[in-house]
Amino acid sequence: ETGVTQTPRHLVMGMTNKKSLKCEQHLGHNAMYWYKQSAKKPLELMFVYNFKEQTENNSVPSRFSPECPNSSHLFLHLHTLQPEDSALYLCASSQVENTDTQYFGPGTRLTVL
Amino acid sequence: GDSVTQMEGPVTLSEEAFLTINCTYTATGYPSLFWYVQYPGEGLQLLLKATKADDKGSNKGFEATYRKETTSFHLEKGSVQVSDSAVYFCALRSSGDKLTFGTGTRLAVRP
């Protein structure tokens, strides 16, 4: 595997379910990001991790819980989501020293019923 | 706060047509400006960037010039190809690690 991978690619869940999104980067980067991409809205930064430490939480509701066990892996744990949380969730990575150039995964298309 | 405004799509062109996708921004200070591209089924990837006024970023035949006086960073290509069909995102970074993106503009190129 190369680049940034995300699993699953598609996820349908009910409002009472608990699920997790996974991201893995094979680029040797030390910063990782979660973004939310909704139709006709700007890409929204959710969380930033530098060297496994969370450096930004962009006022994200607590029903989204990130986890970064090491510099290569990033998770987004989901629980009691709302239908308006349906979106494409993108993971990205970069070098901390060069955050201009971020490498994105293909995303997880999430549908909340 | 920082913001990026892009023209709404979709933009539909015939092959070899000239492309312009408008982008304007609001930011404090002197931001760096970017265009990212998202091909179908793939993640975003950096297309080009400019870090100071009057700089021109270019890549794969695409160009954009950082215009501070009009706070704009319009994307242009002289002759588009079917393979350029994608969603194009304008973005800025004014401080720190955070990139601020626009809504994206979908480009469809017909053979």
Image (tube, coloured by chain):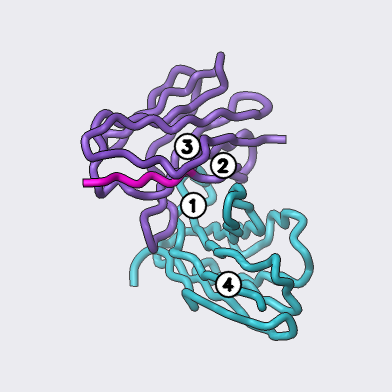
Colour of chain A in the rendered structure image: cyan
Question: Are the residues tagged 2 and 4 within 8 Å (C-beta)?
Answer: no
- Disc 3 is placed on an element classified as strand
Q: Nearer the viewer, mark 1 or mark 3?
A: 3
Question: x and y percent of residue B27 in the render?
Answer: 65, 29
What's under tag 1, amino acid-wise?
Gln
What's under tag 2, amino acid-wise?
Gly
Compared across the picture, whether B106 is left or right of A53 comes to left
- Disc 2 is placed on an element classified as loop
A45, above or below B14, in the image:
below
The span from disc 3 to disc 4 (Cα, nearest Å) is 27 Å
Whether labels 2 and 4 belong to a single chain: the reply is no
First along the sequence among labels 4 and 1: 1
The span from disc 2 to disc 4 (Cα, nearest Å) is 21 Å
Question: x and y percent of residue A24 in the render?
Answer: 47, 71
The span from disc 1 to disc 3 (Cα, nearest Å) is 17 Å
| Residue to which mark 1 is pinned | A95
- Disc 1 is placed on an element classified as strand
A35, above or below B81, in the image:
below
Which chain is purple in the rendering? B
Q: How many marks?
A: 4
B82, above or below A20, in the image:
above
What's under tag 4, amino acid-wise?
Leu
Q: Nearer the viewer, residue B62 or B17?
A: B17
Q: Nearer the viewer, mark 4 or mark 1?
A: 4
